[in-house]
Image (tube, rainbow, N blue to C red):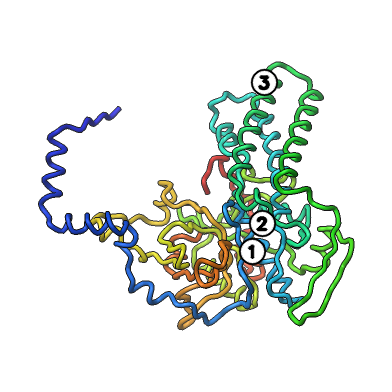
Amino acid sequence: MVKTKLTQADFDAMREQYAKSPRNRVLQRSVMRNGINNTARDNRVVENLNHVYSVQVDTGKVSNQKQSGRCWLFSLLNTLKHNFAQRYDTKDFELSQSYLFFWDKVERANIFYDRILDTADKPFDDRELRCYLGAPGSDGGEWAMAVALVQKYGVMPTSAFPESKVTNSTSDLNEVLNRKMRRDAMVLRDMVHAGKSDEDIKSQRMAMLKEVYRIAGYACGVPPETFDFEYRDDKKKYHLDAGITPKEFLDKYFTINLDDYVVLGNYPNRKMEQLFINPAADNVVGGRHVGFLNMPMDVLKQTVIDQLKDGETVWFANTVTEQSDRQGGLLDNDLYRRDKLFDIDMNMSKAQRLDYYDNIPNHAMTLTGVDLVNDKPTKWKVENSWGEKVGEKGYFVMADNWMDSNVFEVIVNKKYLTAAQRELLDQKPVVLDPWAAV
């Protein structure tokens, strides 16, 4: 094992080198007073990030996930509400994120208990088991997870199932569920090791699941089985559809067939034109598998452009914390010149950054427009779910270079793929390890 002990001579050499350049003292004062990003910010980049787009889908007010990790739900429901708005002339209509969030908690616990029982014979330090125990009650997710919930439970408007204090700020709930479900895992493993009967284990498992349902009910409310859909459209015309179920509502009011949509990934550290799945990331037993068809970035961009031109928005996964001005709603690879500020080499390829855990998808948003110059994209319009007080009334502008480096998945209708590309969807998928970050 390498052991490098720092000595006083090492410290002296560091101090001597630092003191050699007067520039270091100037920059020290600037960084200490203004912070790293404010000092490294390149305002010439900002000048090019205006909110003008040659292709743009007409959308309404943005939603606000507040202090929660439900962006994946917000983004899917954004695409659905855009579809509704176009058909029924109701631009600012919103679907209930809290409704799907409730069912995700119950379904996620259910599949977690299955995984714990499936791995009960593995030692406690097994990598797969540790992966499941990492954050069983978390609220992050993926496109396929949202689709699985929508297809099983339908949707309803926010007016029928509004947000709560807990759904707007989920950390306390996550903490409770993480502790509860880890303890449940301990109890179930102990029962298996003690040779308890399958019937006893099944009974205990159901009792645990009922407790999760109760916790979710306290936090979110219990979703109604039916509701009255009552609204006025943008022309002030009144509408009422009484006693409708969430599944009936989905089937009646939304034309999007979610089975027609595919996840195109761009993970250059993995084989291109290869289908990947990660069943260990699924949230609903029998639901859609989390996965993606890995393709070059130019394929992702072209399919997105085609879908936007046809008036349909696009869900996408990204690393929103990278080179991002949250308040200004700006995304550009050169927004902060930190390498120039510190005079260091920070260059890594997208594949290298994935391999070394430097760039992992952590957010989902919705593409609603693109600016094309000579048929090439220069910047993209992004609908975020952080409310109207950031960006341009909640909309971000994303430079095309940022998309290359920090966008990993887009959801497009498979009709925008070529025949050869669609054939790739029929290949046998590579199953990722449960602990695979991507």
Q: Sequence-wise, which precedes: disc 2 or disc 3?
A: 3
Q: Is residue 80 left or right of residue 293?
A: right
Q: Measuring from the top left, give residue 388's x and y in whole percent.
A: 56, 68
Q: Amino acid at mark 3?
A: Asp
Q: Is residue 384 visible?
A: yes
Q: Sequence-wise, which precedes: disc 3 or disc 1?
A: 3
Residue position for label 1: 422
* In this rendering, the label closer to the viewer, 2 or 3: 3
Q: CA distance from mark 2 to mark 3?
A: 42 Å
Could you say which disc has been placed on residue 5 in the image?
none
Residue density around tag 1, few if under 14, some if 14–19, many if 20 or more, within 10 Å: some
Residue toward you, 29 or 322: 29
Residue position for label 3: 190
Q: Measuring from the top left, give residue 207's x and y in whole percent.
A: 78, 31
Q: Residue at x 85, y 63 (%)?
A: 228
Q: Amino acid at mark 2?
A: Asp
Q: CA distance from mark 1 to mark 2?
A: 8 Å
Residue toward you, 165 or 397: 165
Residue position for label 2: 426
Q: Outermost residue, right direction?
A: 243
Q: Measuring from the top left, give residue 437's x and y in whole percent.
A: 51, 46
